[in-house]
Amino acid sequence: MAAAAPNNIEIPYAPRPEQAEIHSLMDAHRFGVVGAHRRFGKSVLTANELIKRAVSVPAKDWRGAFMAPTYSQAKGIVWDEIRRYTAPIPSHMVNFHESELRVDFINGARIRLYGAENADRMRGMYFDTVVCDEFDDYKMEVWSSIIRPAIADRKGSAYFIGTFKGANGPLGQLYDLAEDDPEWFRRIYPVTETHSLDPVEVAAAKRTMSPEEFAREFMCVRVAAVKNAILGRCVDEADEGGRITSVPHDPSIPVVTAWDLGVGDSTAI
């Protein structure tokens, strides 16, 4: 995909097939959830999606945002990518504000970076497109209480990209909610189904990492356990074998419950 800036300037970006699929899905849906393996190219993808929208919208006050778990992460993840892919645009058409991590375009559009640790900075603002990276490191309230209201009046879009860090983290919760909603799309990209990394490198990583780490970081397995967690691998194997499921309740048969009284987490039954 080459995003056309004013005067038909070409942005030097050629997405891989999986990245191109996500761009197409973003064009067709207001919301989306993507679970993608490490080194998939999420920052390049999101930077170019925001740039494309900024330079092609007719509105003179379009606003885009990229958010990471922390402000410093947002800068490290995507700021250099935004600068790289806007480099062909003449300097009088784009203005960088380093202190605010903000880019202003000649047509009035703006892209700005934020951190979820200080998400209240977004309150009272409006946005047309928001991208949330590594959403499993957020509190769900960042979406429901801050971002969702901020895109309401403009009927804006929001996309959530990252790796799953647990069975029911914020990213997984949104993935489940997206299942039957036509405004949403959802996709999972394990490393075995993309062409992002050399298979030899993937095999070497697998030998080095624990099974839980590899399943979480490269295979996008939602229930990949924390390293050394009790029964973690057993739970992963049960899920992979289709043995974790829902069972209809029969009120005529007694039910036995097992309680995990954890500390600092939700009680599991």
Image (tube, rainbow, N blue to C red):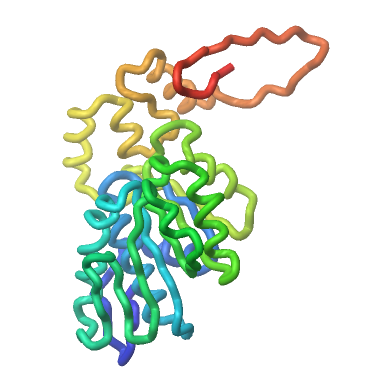
**Res 154 quadrant in image:** bottom right
Q: Is residue 215 visible?
A: yes
Residue 146 at x, y = what percent? Answer: 51, 54
Q: Residue 161 versus residue 148: which sits nearer the camera?
A: 148
Left or right: where 60 falls relative to 255: left
| Front-most of residues 242 and 163 | 163
Residue at left offset 54%, top offset 64%:
151
Locate residue 13, reporting x and y percent.
27, 71
Question: What is the number of callouts on the image?
Answer: 0
Q: Residue at x 50, y 43 (%)?
A: 140
Q: In this view, does 5 lie above or below 43?
A: below
Q: Position of residue 219 (x, y in %)?
A: 35, 38
Quarter of the picture containing the N terminus is: bottom left
| Residue 195 visible in image | no
Residue 20, above or below 8? above
Residue 184 lies, in percent from the top left, at: 57, 56
